[in-house]
Amino acid sequence: MPSDVIQWFPGHMAKTRRLIKENLSKVDVVLNVLDARIPQSSRNPEITRLVAGKPMLNVLSKYTLADPDVSAKWKKYYGESGENCVFIDSVTGYGIKDLLPKIRETVSDKIEKYEAKGMSGRAVRAMIVGIPNSGKSSLINRLAGSKKAKVENRPGVTLTNQWVNTSIGLDLMDMPGVLWPKFDDRKTGENLAITGAIKDQVVVVEDLAVALVDRLRKVCPGKLGERYKLGESDLDASLENWQVAENIGRKRGFLVAGGEVDFLRTANMLLEEFRSGKIGRITLEAPPSK
């Protein structure tokens, strides 16, 4: 990738930060939706500051796309850090039944106060926040039992906050996806773009695919080799990441006149197959060492 750090912070995201602060008093808990494939990169550092003092539950979505062994390490990491978390997948329904009990556990003090006031039937009000394309709308639709929130596999779809009621004693305030103005490092921006939290139109797709190959060679070379039928020579440590990407394009027959690899077609294919889980269940980052 070029040395420039990827950035994407359109105007509506600044508005979302204001909406979060203005509506915080209306909810009991904040559900911070993270991408289970990139738990650290998908965690907006501004959210903790914006919701200071309000109970928060980390909801790691897209679990069935993530490596279950690495997810177990993240669960342990959150527990040791004193943070509540739950892993879910809104498409398959994995972990959904655990969500409401975890929410009620997170706001148990408030529930006791409501019950003491004779308000035992009051629904818990939760604000759902997270980066674009993290799975917020899919989660809302799963909990509501209908398609009340617009869902598309691209960032920047939900642009206004909205209340959604459910039949399970939970009222949801959906907030638009929000990033932060400046990423700390290039890797964070790349991870966000690789998973689709940043629009492909604002990055160089070929560079992004090379960054993805770099990640896959480090965390799951076996899955990479198996998916694209790569031999040892195709994945040799002496090869640059772009050369491995070219080998993949050649294996797929993505060639243009003269026998050269169609790199753009290869790049788009790599990103699509990673995002859809066709390469396998993959987590791009492990928990920090303590």
Image (spheres, rainbow, N blue to C red):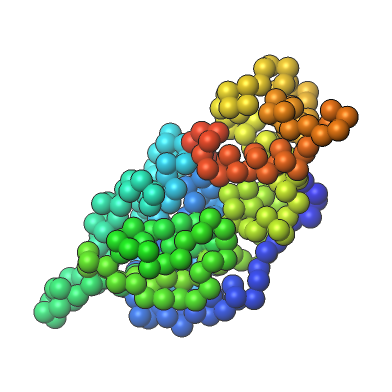
Determine the residue positioned at 59% across, 53% down: 196
Task: Classify 25 as above or below 10.
Answer: below
Determine the residue positioned at 53% across, 36% down: 278
Q: Which quadrant holds residue 270?
A: top right
Determine the residue positioned at 72% across, 21% down: 234
Identify the residue at the far right of this view: 258
Numbered label tally: 0
- The percent position of residue 140, horizontal first and vertical second, equals 37, 63
Judge from the rendering whether residue 190 lies leftward or rightward of residue 64; answer left or right. right
**Relative to the observer, which residue lies in front, 147 or 236?**
147
Determine the residue positioned at 57% across, 66% down: 156
- Residue 112 in view here: yes
**Relative to the observer, which residue lies in front, 137 or 2?**
137
**Relative to the observer, which residue lies in front, 29 or 88?**
88
- The percent position of residue 47, horizontal first and vertical second, equals 50, 67
- The percent position of residue 151, horizontal first and vertical second, equals 47, 61
Task: Classify 20 as above or below 268.
Answer: below
- The percent position of residue 276, horizontal first and vertical second, equals 52, 43
Task: Classify 281 as above or below 86.
Answer: above
- Residue 185 in view here: no
